[in-house]
Amino acid sequence: MIRTLNAALREVLEMPDLKKRALDLGIEAKASSPEEIQERLKADIDKWAGVIERAGIAKQ
């Protein structure tokens, strides 16, 4: 199911009208694989966890 949704999303993101509208809003929409998303999320979690720790922000 994830692969099907990913393929449909890639198709939509290639539509010229959608690309133009997104760029007009300052968004560069880019599809990626489920594995790439997982890697990105892990990297973001690690990055922001470090920022939060260095800033001394208490966990809630």
Image (tube, rainbow, N blue to C red):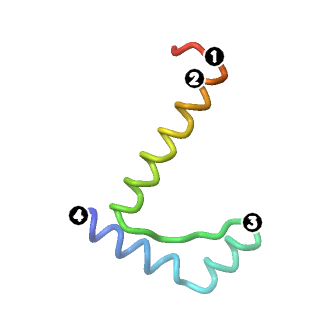
Instruction: Measure the alpha-carbon separation of dots 3 and 1.
Output: 33 Å
Check disc 1: other Cα within 10 Å, few if <14, some if 14-19, many if 20+. Answer: few
Q: Secondary structure at mark 2?
A: helix
**Which comes sooner in the sequence, label 4 or label 3?**
4
The quarter of the picture where the N terminus appears is bottom left
**Which comes sooner in the sequence, label 4 or label 1?**
4
Residue at 48% in and 39% down: 45
Check disc 4: other Cα within 10 Å, few if <14, some if 14-19, many if 20+. Answer: few
Instruction: Measure the alpha-carbon separation of dots 2 and 1.
Output: 5 Å
Residue named by callout 3: 26
Residue named by callout 2: 53
Q: Return the residue nearer the eye: 5 or 43.
A: 43
Mark 2 vs 1: CB contact within 8 A:
yes
Q: Secondary structure at mark 4?
A: loop
Instruction: Measure the alpha-carbon separation of dots 4 and 1.
Output: 41 Å
- Quadrant housing residue 32: bottom left
**Dot 3 amino acid type:** Gly
Query: Residue 38's spot in the image, x, y percent?
Result: 37, 53
The circle on residue 1 is: 4
- Quadrant housing residue 25: bottom right
The circle on residue 34 is: none
Residue at 52% in and 31% down: 49
Q: Secondary structure at mark 1?
A: loop
Residue named by callout 1: 56
Vertical relation: 6 (above or below) 38: below
Q: Return the residue nearer the eye: 44 or 29.
A: 44
Instruction: Measure the alpha-carbon separation of dots 2 and 4.
Output: 37 Å
